[in-house]
Amino acid sequence: MKKLKLFLGGVLSVLMLAGFKPLATNYFQGTDSGIGILILLFLVLVPLLFVLGFLFVQFKIVLNKFQQTRRYHYDFNKLLKELNPKQWQNILQTPKKKCKGNCNGSCLKKTLVFVILGMGSVQYLMAQDGSPTSSSFFSQPGIIITVILLLIPLFLGALFFIHKAIRYIKNRINEKNEVFAQKFSDELQTNLDNNKESLLALKTKQTSVLDETNSTIETDDSKSILENVSDLPQTNFTAFKKKATKRPQLDPDVTKLILWYLGCGAFWLFLGGLIGEYVGIKFVVPEVDQMSWLSFGRLRPVHTNIVFWGWASLSMIGLGIYVVPTVSNTKLYSIKWGWIALVCTNIMIIAGTISLLLGVNNGGGEFREYIWPIMAFFAVALLLTLANFILTVAKRTTHEIYISNWYIISAIIFTVIVALTAYLPFWQDGVSETIVQGYFMHSGVGMWFTLYTLGLLYYFIPQQLNKPIYAYSLGILAFWTQIIFYTVIGTHHFVFAPIPWWLQTVGIVGSAGMIIPVVAATINYSMTFKGQWNKVANSYTLPFFLVPVMYYFIVSMQGTAEAFKFTNLLWHFTDFTVAHAHLGFYGIITFALWGGVYAIVPRLTGNEPPQHLVGVHFWLAFIGILFYTIPLSIGSTLRGLSWMKGDPFIDSVEMMFEWWLWRAIGGSLMFISHIIFAYNFYKMCIKDVEVVNIKDKAFELLMKNK
């Protein structure tokens, strides 16, 4: 509940600040652009400041406890006099079941403090004094943005350092408390053996006093009918979510491999999101920097390639290492190959990022900006992963090949084909390169990310709902029709381009044919949810799987609509395609991967994520993508109409300003959700150190000896 109070205040402040678009717009377009930038970037810093302050206070509390422990001397009689009736029960009789308590009434008061602070921040931002704009160095937009974005990793580093310091101090406290607990347990056992009558008399005397002030609720619930029994006032701000079902533990080496894949993916998502945040802000403040390696032309491919290959690809493979052997009821063929593929992929991303920042690229082909020697590392990773999965399925103990493995293995096979087609030089001249680019760009998204993710959904949705997929035949229909139609639709990006009309027509027809696999898969997933919708409200993973199902239908139908000639003329070369790409990659791929991470990591580590922070993560990402895509789509439609009327180009640029501002706000919310996801992943992988209670530990030792 402490984390709930912290982030509830932060989210309220963010939402309050997000409502002041007109104010920010006036500042950006006026003379005092520095204040406008501060308003926008404040969305990113407020939650980090809250988290840093919270952890610092927690650090001080733990440090104070440590100092008290160092001055503390073991006193058996003092500990004995502090026992309450339930603890006497543990000593003299069989211990009763402990009741689970929830949040007390002080949560509301402390939460109101955050609300007031948030309101105060808004009032401060609304203050206008009409003073002339400062021309100092630190009032320049580029300096402000650069400093603040550089501070974000420093803040996160400080959070990590404080968290590690707290764990270290708690471990030192526990070492001393465990010694005291052993002494207390030994002396209690001695008194039970030699002088039980005096303990009974002392217990009777103390109970008569404690019963007046420290009454407790005793429950005898052998059938586990009662839940959350507590005598404390309860104020529940959110519903309690069902925890992950315990599963047989995987091989520790496989668990480690999966966690490394997902951990690297979370890191690249943070870094790629940070670069994307900067790129989005450049639309609002184009004069933010003057350096070539920070130009839009270099940073944009850095952002897209990091989230494509670093976040999505590594996370997909990591989840596949869990799913493929599970549905095959066998072990992964080679753990070593998995590690080699992980290292090769990370080498590719690091080398590719450096080369793009230096201006070394593959001629500007979208999503294939990495030069071939760098992309070769990913080719090795893909081939190893493909061989690993095929050999794993080959030694399955089940009769059939589950549909998830159809999708996952086919996605890797098609990606190898697509990559070879895009990088072999035999057809890379003139118009042929344009056709190959369309094939690679669209098939890279549809035959790698989408096909693979659909396979993951065919496992996770039935598994989380605890029921089989609605219709296996619909899955096969969607599989084969996607392979038939998706591989020929790349040229719908080049309608009215100097390529053969018949090829453009094939792209349009293939796009229309995609209605078949999209509708088939959507019906299959949705009907699997039928009769189980109540589980969505009680689960923190199912909402992450429901969003991809919804967006898969919406975005795919939108893609079909974009392929036709009029809409292509209206939307192409505008930010509508940017909104469409983000809605698809974020709404389908990223949400599905988040759901997979939250579904399997608690089973691998035994640690649940902070459920309230999972909710904050979900809603910030969901609201953020809506703020990003809806205004951008509207503005881009108006811009396309402006071009079709023949208006001056600069008029459309000025008109897009407020829509780009909404893009920056939505991107900020999405970036904050990435930070929260990284923290949740860390919490699932690292077990918290609980300070040992001397009396509770003593009772535990005492019960072992009974």
Image (cartoon, rainbow, N blue to C red):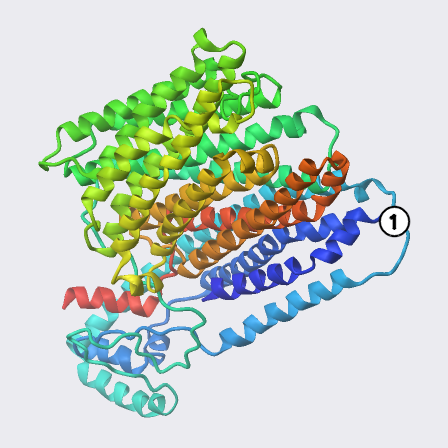
- For mark 1, what is the residue? 133
- The answer to which image quadrant residue 361 occupies is top right
Q: Position of residue 543 (x, y in %)?
A: 38, 56
Q: In front here: 363 or 495?
A: 495
Quadrant of the drawing holding the C terminus: bottom left
Give residue 618's quadrant in the image: bottom left
Position above or below: 137 against 225: above
Q: How dense is the environment of label 1, judged by Cα within 10 Å: few (below 14), some, or many (20 and up)?
A: few
Q: Residue at x 37, y 76 (%)?
A: 78
Q: Amino acid at mark 1?
A: Thr
Q: At which x and y percent is residue 405?
A: 23, 35
Residue 704's place in the image compared with 424, above or below, is below
Query: Which image quadrant: the N terminus?
Result: bottom left
Task: Say whether residue 481 is left or right of residue 551.
Answer: left
Extreme residue toward the right, this view: 132
Seen at 35% across and 19% down, the residue is 417
Res 384 seen here: yes
Q: Position of residue 420 (x, y in %)?
A: 39, 16
